[in-house]
Image (cartoon, helix red, strand yellow):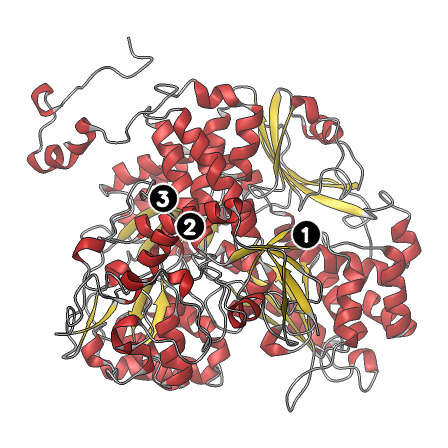
């Protein structure tokens, strides 16, 4: 469809239909662009013009939004768009070789659309299938458990142009892999139970229970939930129609984290109950779920669930038959941007804008979604809130440690026997977790994803808790045979790819650091690059606009301190070596002339380590 | 009277004023590129990073608080600012000797001010074609530092939205409001505020490039730190004379 062109009239009709379905609301721009792309495979310039006109937005602003998100395309793409998940755990399971294998089979170059417009193959940031990787996305649909056989079969299916709907269902199977259940994962509840309990308590008393529970946010930052709720409840709305919002952050993009996926799959009612409890408590009548695009396959079942709740009076005008208590939930899809996990970037994205973090203050609790007081909570936090509504705050506070009450879901992946979800009371030691998941020869664990911290063997006795090792839940385990330099290099490229580009230090610094790591990997590194990394780390840590930039060099800093030999054995000299490689500079000429003989190479001198 | 202590000097401020505004009013220079006294602060270039009560913050966005101790002109901060300038220099294609904005360019002036002697980092050499389609104005994207002043001026003052940003991360770039991507196909005019605010050499009036010879331009005459000004006197150097 794409390159054949689509007549202006049909384009108009198609796009105006989509815009109309969204009520012509410019705030729904991202959702509109997603749907337009679903219909057109990509977003041609003419389509952006039509959408801009229909929404009354400047065209440049629409293009600005479309250009921000990884999964929106402004140029023609293949009819089959294959994106390999590029987390380090996927790589450890052989995703790199599988990508090459598929490219060879399809006779295409990575990152380029095949000449017949059939297919493109590239990588994408972690798709959240680390416990059942290697994984990939085809036209946005998640595939798991790739193997050489499966890749060959996928190549055949693409070449035969078999529609995705007719591919073997097994390819799309996503398992929960729950390995250890504690109070949340083993709880028995009926849909609406938590909400009824909260209504029975009353909003003030519910807030009191939240306070008693001392629940802290499970998304990573660990902010005390009742303070957020109370601030939003106390804040007054703005404008002619003041209101409040509850937003669920289901943009689980931190590489190595997949616990929210499991909650959204099998505990959605608990989540929606939690959101309704939050809405009831702070006086909000609308909730929004921001669901990462990689989990779009969950949308149909989530929407069905919401519809079921409306039918049974758990959503809508009179919740549980209480007139005056109204709450409904809407789901927005992301489009491939890790930074949208930052709560203010998420709000921008929800408003149909580029996902750029806002200047804080003001904080979302006073000025959030559409400028109204908004509580933004992680999926797991809201599920915990639902449990607190049922069981009470004191019960919850009795679990875990004093400063870190309750339990925590851990997403365990990497070199372990049983990757999956483990729920523990806070305070559990890393050693305990490693024993339970069968991590025999671990040399390091990346806790809480690339923006968290890397712990080595001598630190395994440390405990997961805000007072010791805080975590959003990811544990990526690296066996003794893994190269920690390559782990850090993978993370450096992740941050460079995901930087929103708003502030100078993060935009440029993350690319510079990725460049330093590549230079070291290519055998041109020296102590100079290591000093550079430290210098850039110090700058990004203090001068970046948001947590992404502030944390971007953490994995390098951690691994440089704990696994320095992994870097040093790659260094060409301990002083300085130029990045310019004369032989590499001839590569383009070699490719163009089809030559690869000895005379087409310039071998300056053998690399260090080569005899 | 509420005051902040800027490098030990007490400065009065009014409620709601930022550190930058308080400093500017007192005639004290805090390096900046994306800040402009006439526009809403945006805090993206981070050149104005200062230390307020021990925390690194952007002076242009942080409201002043009574008794706040702010460190501005210190080796540590100027060192960080120099690194940020170097990042901006290697990210784009900045060749001062051949640039017609030389002497009127804030990026260049700050590089002199902060004694940036080399770009230090490896150059990115991005491919950024110029747009010469407009009869009166040339757009040389090679020099864009993504400060969004033209975006803000066109949107907030001209009411036109001629400029916007697209892309993400290191691929973020300035675009214009036309399906063709050409400035000539927008409603941009030389009389727009957006034509006056570029701190570097992206938005250039054609045929006027060297009306004032290099050596007699704004920052040739006096260093940027000596030219602290409040709203609304500032314009880009060229149009001022």
Foreground residue, A310 or A523?
A: A523
Quick one: SS at disc 2?
helix
Q: Which chain hosts label 3? A: A
Q: Which residue is mark 3?
A: A154
Q: CA distance from mark 2 to mark 1?
A: 27 Å
Q: CA distance from mark 3 to mark 1?
A: 40 Å
Residue that appears at 71% across and 45% down: A409
Tell me residue A389's x, y (percent): 85, 63
Q: Which residue is the site of mark 1?
A: A221
The N terminus of chain A is located in which quarter? bottom left
Horizontal relation, residue B102 to residue A504: left or right = left
Tell me if residue A93 can be seen: no
A31 relative to A525, above or below: below
Tell me the quadrant of the picture where the C terminus of chain A can be found.
top left
Q: Give coordinates of residue A469: x percent, y percent.
A: 72, 38
Would residue A166 be visible to someone looking at this image? yes
The chain ID associated with circle 1 is A
């Amino acid at each position: 469809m794409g390159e054949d062109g689509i007549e202006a009239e049909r384009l108009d009709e198609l796009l105006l239909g989509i815009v109309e379905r969204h009520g012509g609301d410019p705030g729904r721009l991202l959702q509109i662009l997603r749907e337009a792309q679903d219909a057109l495979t990509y977003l041609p310039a003419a389509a952006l013009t039509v959408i801009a006109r229909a929404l009354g937005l400047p065209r440049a602003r629409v293009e600005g939004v479309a250009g921000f998100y990884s999964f929106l395309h402004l140029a023609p793409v293949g009819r089959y768009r294959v994106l390999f998940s590029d987390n380090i755990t996927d790589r450890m399971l052989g995703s790199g070789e599988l990508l090459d294998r598929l490219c060879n089979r399809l006779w295409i170059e990575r990152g380029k659309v095949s000449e017949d417009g059939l297919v493109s193959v590239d990588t994408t940031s972690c798709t959240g299938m680390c416990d059942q990787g290697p994984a990939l996305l085809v036209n946005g649909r998640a595939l798991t458990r790739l193997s050489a056989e499966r890749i060959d079969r996928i190549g055949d299916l693409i070449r035969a142009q078999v529609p995705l709907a007719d591919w073997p269902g097994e390819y799309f199977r996503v398992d929960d892999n729950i390995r250890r259940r504690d109070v949340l994962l083993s709880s028995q509840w009926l849909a609406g139970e938590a909400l009824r309990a909260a209504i029975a308590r009353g909003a003030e008393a519910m807030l009191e229970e939240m306070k008693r529970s001392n629940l802290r946010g499970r998304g990573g930052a660990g902010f005390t939930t009742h303070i957020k709720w109370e601030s939003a409840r106390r804040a007054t709305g703005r404008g002619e129609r003041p209101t409040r919002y509850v937003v669920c952050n289901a943009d689980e993009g931190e590489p190595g984290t997949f616990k929210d996926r499991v909650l959204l799959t099998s505990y959605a009612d608990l989540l929606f109950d939690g959101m309704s409890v939050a809405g009831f408590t702070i006086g909000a009548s609308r909730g929004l779920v921001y669901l990462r695009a990689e989990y779009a396959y969950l949308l149909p079942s989530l929407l069905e669930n919401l519809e079921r709740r409306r039918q049974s009076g758990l959503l809508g005008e009179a919740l549980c038959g209480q007139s005056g208590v109204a709450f409904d939930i809407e789901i927005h899809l992301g489009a491939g941007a890790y930074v949208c996990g930052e709560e203010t970037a998420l709000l921008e994205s929800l408003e149909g804008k580029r996902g750029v973090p806002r200047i804080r203050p003001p904080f979302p609790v006073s000025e959030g979604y559409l400028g109204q007081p908004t509580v933004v909570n992680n999926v797991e936090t809201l599920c915990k809130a639902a449990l607190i509504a049922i069981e009470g705050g004191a019960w919850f506070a009795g679990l875990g440690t004093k400063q870190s009450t309750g339990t925590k879901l851990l997403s365990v992946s990497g070199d372990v026997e049983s990757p999956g979800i483990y729920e523990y009371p806070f305070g559990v030691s890393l050693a305990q977790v490693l024993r339970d998941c069968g991590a025999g020869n671990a040399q390091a664990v990346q806790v809480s994803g690339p923006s968290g911290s890397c712990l080595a063997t001598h630190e395994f006795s440390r405990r997961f808790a805000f007072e010791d090792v805080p975590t959003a839940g990811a544990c990526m385990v690296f066996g003794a045979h893994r190269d920690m330099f390559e782990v850090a290099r993978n993370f450096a490229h992740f941050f460079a790819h995901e930087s929103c580009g708003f502030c100078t230090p993060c935009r440029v610094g993350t690319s510079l650091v990725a460049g330093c790591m590549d230079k070291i990997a290519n055998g041109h590194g020296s102590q100079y690059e290591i000093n550079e990394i430290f210098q850039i780390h110090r700058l990004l840590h203090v001068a970046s606009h948001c947590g992404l930039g502030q944390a971007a060099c953490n994995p390098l800093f951690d691994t440089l301190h704990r696994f320095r030999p992994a870097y040093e054995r790659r260094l060409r000299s301990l002083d300085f070596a130029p990045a310019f490689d004369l032989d590499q500079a001839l590569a383009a000429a070699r490719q163009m002339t089809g030559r690869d003989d000895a005379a087409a190479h310039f071998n300056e001198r053998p690399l260090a380590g080569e005899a | 009277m509420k005051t902040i202590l800027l490098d030990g000097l007490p400065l009065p401020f009014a409620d709601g004023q930022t550190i930058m505004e308080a400093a500017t009013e007192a005639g004290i220079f805090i390096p900046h590129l994306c800040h402009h006294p006439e526009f809403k602060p945006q805090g993206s270039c981070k050149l104005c990073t200062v230390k307020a009560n021990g925390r690194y913050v952007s002076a242009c966005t942080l409201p002043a608080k009574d008794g706040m101790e702010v460190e501005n002109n210190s080796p540590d901060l100027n060192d960080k600012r120099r690194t940020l300038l170097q990042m901006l220099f290697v990210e784009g294609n900045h060749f001062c000797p051949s640039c017609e904005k030389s002497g009127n360019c804030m990026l260049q002036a700050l590089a002199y001010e902060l004694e940036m002697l080399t770009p230090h980092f490896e150059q990115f050499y991005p491919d950024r074609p110029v747009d010469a389609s407009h009869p009166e104005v040339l757009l040389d994207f090679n020099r864009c530092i993504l400060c969004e002043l033209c975006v803000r001026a066109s949107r907030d003052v001209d009411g036109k939205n001629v400029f916007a940003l697209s892309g993400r991360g290191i691929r973020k770039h300035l675009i214009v409001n036309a399906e063709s991507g050409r400035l000539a196909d927008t409603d941009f005019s030389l009389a727009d505020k957006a034509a006056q605010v570029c701190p570097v050499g992206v938005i250039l009036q054609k045929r006027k490039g060297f009306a004032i010879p290099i050596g007699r331009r704004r920052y040739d005459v006096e260093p940027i730190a000596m030219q602290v000004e409040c709203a609304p006197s500032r314009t880009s150097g060229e149009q001022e004379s």
